Image (tube, helix red, strand yellow):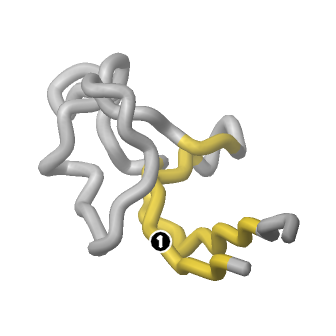
Amino acid sequence: MIDVEMWAIKDTEKDQMIKTKWGRSLWSRKQSPKTLNIIGYRKWERGTNNLKPIKVRVVEVLDD
């Protein structure tokens, strides 16, 4: 069994996880939404005020 805690960026307005320009949605370190290149969430247009980092738990159960 694999049990890992990782970080993701969540849109609190739409209540969903966000992918970056490179298709990445989980990180081992906490990321700031203002430093990531996220399509549709530019600081000067819409802003990143509704984005926040959250901790996600990933569990994988292996069959023997």
Query: Measuring 64% from the left and 81% from the top, which residue is drawn there?
Result: 3
Judging by the rendered image, the residue that carries numbered circle 1 is 6
* As drawn, 19 above or below 51: above
Query: Measuring 72% from the left and 71% from the top, which residue is drawn there?
Result: 59
Of 11 and 25, which appears nearest the observer?
Answer: 25
| Place of residue 11 in the rendered image (x, y in percent of width and height, measured from the top left) | 55, 44
| Place of residue 4 in the rendered image (x, y in percent of width and height, measured from the top left) | 56, 78
The single residue placed furthest to the front in the displayed view is 64
Horizontal arrangement in the rendering, residue 39 relative to residue 42 (left or right): right
The single residue placed furthest to the right in the displayed view is 63
Horizontal arrangement in the rendering, residue 50 relative to residue 1 (left or right): left
Query: Measuring 25% from the left and 20% from the top, which residue is drawn there?
Result: 45
Of 11 and 3, which appears nearest the observer?
Answer: 3
Query: Measuring 26% from the left and 63% from the top, which residue is drawn there?
Result: 31
* As drawn, 15 above or below 31: above
Q: Secondary structure at mark 1?
A: strand
Determine the image quadrant of residue 39: top left
Horizontal arrangement in the rendering, residue 41 relative to residue 17 (left or right): left
Circle 1 Cα neighbour tier, 10 Å, few/some/many (<14 / 14–19 / ≥20): some
* As drawn, 41 above or below 18: above
| Place of residue 50 in the rendered image (x, y in percent of width and height, measured from the top left) | 47, 48
Question: Which quarter of the figure is the C terminus placed in?
Answer: bottom right
**Could you tell me the amino acid type at mark 1?**
Met
Question: Which quarter of the figure is the N terminus placed in?
Answer: bottom right
| Place of residue 44 in the rendered image (x, y in percent of width and height, measured from the top left) | 16, 27
Image mark count: 1
Horizontal arrangement in the rendering, residue 2 relative to residue 23 (left or right): right
